[in-house]
Each structure stands twice: as C-alpha cells, then as structure tokens.
Image (cartoon, grey):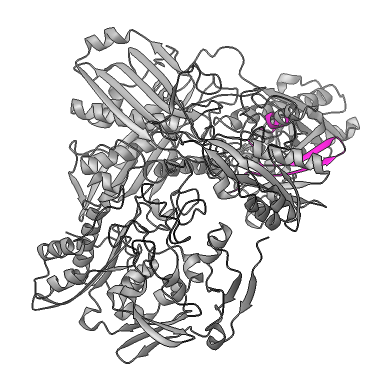
Amino acid sequence: MNRFEYERAGTLAEAIGAEGAFLAGGTNLLDLMKIGVQAPARLVDISRLPLTEIEPVEGGLRIGAMVRNSTLARDPQVLAKYPALAEALLSGASAQLRNAASTGGNVMQATRCSYYQDPLSPCNRRNPGSGCGALGGETRNHAVLGWTEGCIATHPSDMCVALAAYDAVVEISGPEGARSVAMAEFHPLPDAQGAGDAPLAAGEIITHIRLPDPGAMARHARYVKLRERTSFAFAIVSAAAALAVEDGRITQARLALGGVAARPWRCRTAEAALLGQPATIETFTRAAELALEGASPSGANEAKIRLARKIAIRALERAAAGTPERLPALPASLFAGDDNG
Amino acid sequence: MADMMTAGGHVRLGSNAGQGLTRRDGVLKVTGGAGYAADCRPEGLLHAVTASAGIARGRVTHLDVAAAEAHPGVVKVYTHANALPLALSPDNKIHPFVWRMDALQSDEVRYAGQPIALVVAHSLEAATEGARLLAPQYDAQPARVTLDDAEPYETDTTAFGRPSGHSSGDIEAARAAADSHLTTTVETPSQYHNPLEPHAITAQWHGDQLEIDTPNQAIGLAKQTIAAFLGIDPSQILLRSPFLGGGFGAKAIVFGAQFLTILAARDLGQPVKMVLRRDQMYGPVGHRAPTRQTLQLDLDAEGHILALEHDTITTTSTFDQFLESASNASHSVYATSALRTEHHARRADIGTPGPMRAPGEASGSAALEIAMDVAAEARGMDPLAFRRLNYAKIDPSTGLAFSSKALEECYAKAAEAFGWEGRPLAPRQMREGRLLKGWGMGTAQFPCPMFQAAAHATLRADGSAVIETSAADMGQGAWTALAQIAADGLGIDVDKVEFRSGRSDLPDAGVAGGSGHTATAGNALFNAGADAVRQMVDLATNDPASPLFGAGNLGVTARGGRLHRNDDDRSESYEDILARAGLELLRGEGKASREGTPERAMFSHGGVFAEVLVDPDLGQIRVSRLIGAFAAGRIINPRLARSQLLGGMIWGIGFALHEEALHDARTGRFVNNDFAGYHVPVNADVPMIEAMTVHEDDPFVNALGIKGVGEIGVTGTVGAIANAVWHATGIRPARFPIHPESLI
C-alpha cells in the first residue's frame, strides 16, 4: 500500500515545524489521499490539540482552530453576534461532516475543481508547471473573478465567505514565530503561472480565527447560497452581507462572494459605494454591479456572473431586513421562507 | 442467511397478500446482520483491483507491470498480454442480458474507465497501490463522447431485440388533416445508476466447482452467462445474491470486471474478491445514455391528437449496442390516429449503456409530457383536460384494448388531493412570497411484462413451510411481498413461511427487472403453494380417517394452516393430515410465465402532479409538493408498494433537477464520477410527497392480477416537474437537468 508515517502532536509546540501534512478532521485530506491527489509521506495528527475554545476577547471573538464546524455553528456568541457565520456553516456539507470538520481545516480545504481532483489531468495547483486542465474543459463551476490562465479554480468554503465579510483574521504560528493574515487575503490568487504561493509556509499552523466585534451589524447579517440540490452541495455562487443602517442610511457595509474565485471575494468597492446610501434595491443593485466589476467568464460560465450579482443583491436585501431571531430550517437557502418581496 | 423467518406481531385482516407488512429482512439490515457480497471473507482471500483507462480511445502502449508486481503484497497482475481466455467470443450473446464480456482481450481502449488490468494482492491496499503503479501509457485518439461528435449508426433494434421504429396509421394524411403542428425538442443527459452497493464479487473454486457471491438481479441468467464464458456446466456454479444494495438495472448483467475476478480465482487457486470503487462504476457497468428527442403533435381544431411522431437520437458504445428506447414511451399513452416512432444512434467512446430504472420510459415520458403541455398551451387548454381529451381507450400502437386501465381514476384522485382545480392557465400567475409558484402534471405509464419463473413450496410436519425460488431483493421488498403471496398459495400464515431465495441452486425466479418480478416470481410461488395444497387435499379427502374424507377437491378450502370442508364446518390441520399419512413434508412445484401473444395491452398507469417554487432572480427550483396516484393491479403489500412509488417519484426529482454525468470532451474522462459531483436528491429536496394507489382488478395480466410498481413512479414525474417549472416561470425547459441559469 501507499505507506505514510503517522504522528500525533500532543501540544502546539510539537505541531509547529513538524514535517508532513496536518490532519485535523480528515474530511478532505483523506479523500484526496484515497484518490491519489495528495500523497504525504507523513501525517501529523493535530486533531487533539487544545485549540478548542471559542473565547470572547477584547473587541471580538477568538475561535480555536480545532473547534468543530458543528460546535461553532451552534455557539451562542456566534449565533448572537455573527449569525451569517452560523448560517454559512450550517449550509455547508452534511451534519456528519460538520461534526468532524475543524475550523482550521475548513480554511485549508482544497478546491473541488474536478481537474485538480483528477491526477491524470494537468493542474498547476497540484503539479506546478503542468498547466491548467480546467481551461477549455467543463467550467460551469469555475472562477469568474481573480483567475488567470494558470488556474481557474474556486475555493469551496462557505464559512470563509462569512469570515471574510466579518473582517476575520487568521492567526498563524510557525517556526519563525506568529503572524496574522486577514481572511480575505489568506488564500492566494493565482498568478500567470499557476495557483500562487501556498498560504502557509512549511511547518506553519493555523491556531485561531479572530473576529472583530460587528457592532451595529450584528443583527443585520446574512449568508445566501445558490445550489441545485437543496442541501449537501457546494455553492454555485454565494454571498455574505452585513449592514448597519442609521436614519435610513447605510453606515457600515460588508459584502463577500463565494464560489467565484480562488478565495472568498471581499467586495470593498461595493461596500464603499453602499455607505451613506439608502438601503434600497437600487442601492444594492449598484453595489452588486460594482462587486462583479472586472468579472469575466473563465469558460462556459458567463451565467455565474449574472448569478453572483443577483445573490449579492439578495444577501444585502436580507441583511437590511435583519437577521431572524432563529436561523431558518434551511440555512442560507433561497427557500428559507424569508424573502417577502 | 437464506432463512428469513422473523418474529411476527403483524395485525392482519384476512389473507396475507394485501397487508402492509414491514420488511422481513428489515431487522437484519438495520443491525448489520444482512451479509452482502463485499462482506465475504473466505479463508485465503485475495483482493483484486482493476486499473481503469485514463483515455477514451486509443491503445495501451505500456504498463509498468514490474513495478506493480514488485510492490509488497501483490500476487499477480493481469493485462491484455497475459489475459486469461474465455470459452466464447466476448461478443457472443447467449441470451439478451449479455453485454460484451470485456476481459482484457486487447490493448485497445474504447472508453474512459475501461478496465485495462487486474491486480491481485493479499490486501485491498496493496492491490490498489499495485494498480496505481501500473502507470499506463497510451497512444490516444481524440475522444468522441457527445451526441454531436459521435458517429451516426443505424440499427433495427434498440434493446432486448425490440424494433427501433414503429409506424401505425397514415401519418401524412393525419398531418394534412391537422389544424396545428407542434414540435418539441428535449435533451436528457447521461445518467448513472449509482446503487449504494457497488458491483462486488467474491469468487472461489473448489476443484471444478465455482462459488460466487455477487449482487445480481437475474441469478439464473447470471449463472448461464458465467457458465458459458467459462465453458463449464451451469450445475458447477453456485451463485449467492441474498441482498442487493440497490440495482436499478446495473446489476441485471454480469460485466467483464466481475468475470475477470472469477478467472483470476481459478488461475490462482485462491478465493478472490473485487469491489468496484464509486468512480469505477462510471463506464464498465452500464448507464442511461443521453437522448435528443423531437416530438411532433398534430392537432385538430378541438385539440385531438391526429398524429404523434417521436424521434430519439441516443448514444451507444463503439463495440456493443443498447439504445435508450425513449420514443417507445409514446406508443400507448395517448390516443392518436397515426403514430410514428424512430430511434437513431451515435457510436461514442463510452461504456455500453444498459437498462436503468425505466429504461426508455423515463427519458421518453419526460419529453412526451413536455410535448403534451406545449400542445395544451397552444390550444389554450388545461393540461389535465387536454390529456383527458386525448385519453387512449385502446392502445394506439396495437389497437388492442387495455387489460385494465384506471388512469381516469388516478387523474381524479391525484388532482383532488393536489387541489389542481382553479389552476390559472397562464404561467407566472402564482407566487409564494417572492418565489414563483407553478403547477404541472404528467401521465405515468409502465408496461407489465411477465418473465419465466419456477418455485417450490414445501409444507412441513409442524405446519410450517419453506418456499424456494432464486428471487432478488434489491431493497424493493421481494423477501416480504413474495412470502406473502406464497403464504396465500399455501393457505398458511406468512410467519410460518421460511423463505429461501437469492441462490442459484434454487428454482429460477427470472429477472428482477421490468417491474415484473413480483408478478412473475409471485405467480410461480402461488402455484407451487397451490400444488402442495392440492396434494394435501388428495391425502385428506381420500383418507377415511380424515374429517375431510369424501369432500372432494372442489369442496375444500385451505385457510390458516387447515383444510376446511365447504359443505360443513369440519376441518383438519396440515400437521394432522401429514402425521396420519406418515409424511415429513409435502412439496409443491409451480411455474409462471405469459404464454402466447397477448390479446390485451397491459400497463400500469398513474397521474403525477407537481408544485414547484422557483426563485425569480436566481432560478433555483424546489419541488414543494409531489402527489401521484397509481393503478397497478393488485397491490400485494401497500407499505412496500408506496415505498417503491415514492422512490420512483424521487428518482424523477433527481432526473428533472440533479442527475447528469459530465465528460471532459477532450479526454472523454468523467469530471463528476462521485457522489460529491453527481447529485441525487437528498431529504431536503423532498419536502412533501405522496403516492396513492387506485384499486384495479386485472384478469388478464396474470392469475393474481399483479402489475408491478418498481419503475412507473419515474414516468410522469419528470414531465410534471418540468411543466410546473414552465407554469412558474413561463420558460419551457428544453433539457434535463433543469439548471437555474436556464430560467433567468
């Protein structure tokens, strides 16, 4: 069999600098190993690391990298102040996978680009310099923003889209010390040659995600996800939006898109354009136009640009209407029963 | 394992058939006690893994056999260079359920995913790694995988010897007389069966005797196939298939990958097991081929269909033939004075298609029901009223009367339960909040075939019985429904029936396919029971010591494990009759088939009504309500029948909205050959669904009046959903699955 070493890291110190692939929930890495896409010589099991706290910190919340997706989604602090994060988490995968998947692992999950997942296809992300197999192939699910001919893959996470909108920061520890990177910039965009640099240097590990206080946006934040299957499917496109509105005018705005690029796509130009405007469909439509400015199809996926505009508008509309007391039974769904327009 | 007696506790009102018993194998299945083929671990077991072709057309130029054989644990590598011979040409068709027996005959690659080597090892992991180490190199040709780039191919037959075309009535004259002509084109994609249990096989030879554990829907035919290609006598083979984790047609056939395992076990003198991975289920074990269907309906001024033409273009492989016979779905549903159907093929670099749940009927019904809605719209008629106007009182393709047809009752019952009345004619008239709401309907129809089956029923001294036939339980509940029928044949309680099934050393129960298994195996079992009872009656009525002495055959009824005189209230138990005769057991034999040319058209029918919600901006669709009523002859077990009908309707949701296998057009490889990429419905896609049945007595289909419910639920449903999408959006779906972006 394809042999690999296995080691369990008992402490963070043991994990930092360890050579090999970090194994947390295993919901993605083990699949990739089975299909021959990844073949690490060594697995470093970090699933028992004591990074499992969700703690209020000054100005926000700090989430341990080993907090399970299901735990995070049901945390009272998250539900109260970051409901779009809970909604994003609950719209992802299945209950069984959410029980296993970790916060850090969700950030680190690989693209679901089918050419990345097919070891016989060229892929700059998997095999730098081999080319992009997806270009000219089946590209309905591929990027419309920030792509190059080197790579047109998208990042599949729902959670990261909400985190990017909330201005989350990824805390990283490594042999060279600790550093922090904004969630919205954590995943590299492709360059002309390929997928870009790895987000983490060798031996680096995500320890926490830090969320700043959303302030007045706490109860005006939503995540919306388009997919053909009502549950257990990745987004065709998705959006996280948060707003603060005072005297009819938008005073704070956040917007991030999912399923459109190699990273959760924070739409800062659109956010700036929302400020000072009335929270109306016209305002949101203009913002959505700005959000997709520069978008272009990477293949037969022109429709995704239209869909991304529409989902941005919907997320803003829902955010403006306010987060419901309880999350809908179908989180993030267009059929959640709360679009009475 | 074949002994399936379980504790009772059911409440019954009379005979066994007709009762909604829970599954007799249910406890075994939910406790892990049901053994599947992949669970077999005989002593000395070796594991086999196939290497799959990474190109769709060309030749294998190199396999690194040395690297694979050098891997620890690898026992042997089979490639085209050392392939084990078959006793017959791989293209030999000894019966209709034989597909080309692709077993490494050459270096030629004809579809992506084709097995190009078999690696046998001491562990699954070693075999898997060995297959990877083969690192095949190819001389590749451009792949042709779509309807548009594949080679045209004309054939006289579609599948199982059925003609590829049909014509009745004078279509040109009918057309000339028509007031309007409506053409509809619909495309359906490649679909894969995806039973949860993949094709698995454990093969072990004991001298020249072969034991096989493999899930199969046609045990008797599988034994014949394997014996023929091995060149041995069928009596040398014992095939066990006690449980199938779903079949849907994919397991009606023994495929080359399975056969390679049998050959390897013989060659190595050790048991060998092979379980296909999910991705390996895409190519070598059949699928539903894509179709492009064009229908023309020619109507008179009142909306009567004068002519109906249905053409299908579909793909088959370059080396074998199976056509998705979609056009045949238009033969018998609606009245028309003239009918013409055709099938044209394209030869593509794909694995050979095969029968997949409602083969032909599913794709064809989807297109026909859209075409009917187009016609109703053009005539300004309510879709149900339009279908009633064109209700077929006889089968237009044959002119035969229907053996029974309670379709009108189905329409009425389902329409009422759905609340169809008051549906606005025009689209985009209904909303739920912001969402567009639409209602659509379709007619369900599926034929009622009978195959051939034989069965034994043995009454035992203690009043219990054992019934034997090689039936297949794919999850549909054959273990339960067939036992109910057998118990009625024997005149005993079903809890006294021990059911032996799923083995090739039992009388052949025929194919669990075509929705004909309950009818075929059930009638054979009933006849076997009746034969045993006849012998019991002879014993008793000829025995002066019996209270039944002198009653005569016609004067006795078997009921509750006793024979009752019809002329007075005397009776005697089976135990007492056998004891006095000094018999341990009494065995009856039965057969079933449909002889001669049918004088009636035999179909199950139904009406399916769908409500969809569609997001007007983003195009996402949800089937918010789905209600069907079906007339399918005698219902043996209402609980299981409902489950089958619901399963078929949910399959229809998947057909309409989700299922689609995609090839990369350049390489021919699949891009979504796993459950993450190939979507089937989940619970959240089915918020409200109901299947009802309508009573139907059918004296023609078979002695028990059984029609079958396994596939009809798919038909009607797909079209009903598409028509509801039109009603919600005003956009007429032209291809399946219906993508959100096609609606905005």
Q: Position of residue B376 (x, y in %)?
A: 24, 28
**Above or below: residue A257 compared with residue A136:** below
The residue at 54%/88% (across/down) is A13
Q: Is B716 or B226 nearer to us in this picture?
A: B226
Image position, residue B272 (x, y; %): 75, 46
Q: Quick check: is A136 in the magenta stretch? A: no
Residue at the extreme bottom of the image, as rendered: A58
The residue depicted at 28 percent of the width and 27 percent of the height is B184
Whether residue B137 is visible: yes
Residue B60 locus on image (x, y percent): 60, 39
- Residue B564 visible to the viewer: no
Q: In the displayed image of the protein, which residue is found farthest to the right?
A: B582
Residue A305 vs residue B443: left or right?
left
In the image, is residue B220 part of the stretch drawn in magenta?
Answer: yes
Label tally = 0
Give residue A207's quadrant in the image: bottom left
Q: Nearer the viewer, residue B311 or B386?
A: B311
Residue B170 appears in which quarter of the rendering? top left
Q: Where B671 sits versus B154, above or below? A: below
Residue B77 lies, in percent from the top left, at 72, 46
Q: Compared to B340, does A73 lie above or below?
A: below
Q: Is residue A204 above or below residue B353?
A: below
Is B296 in front, or is B317? B317
Question: Considering depth in this image, is B18 or B560 the residue closer to the camera?
Answer: B18
Tell me where the magenta segment starts and ends, as one range. B197-223
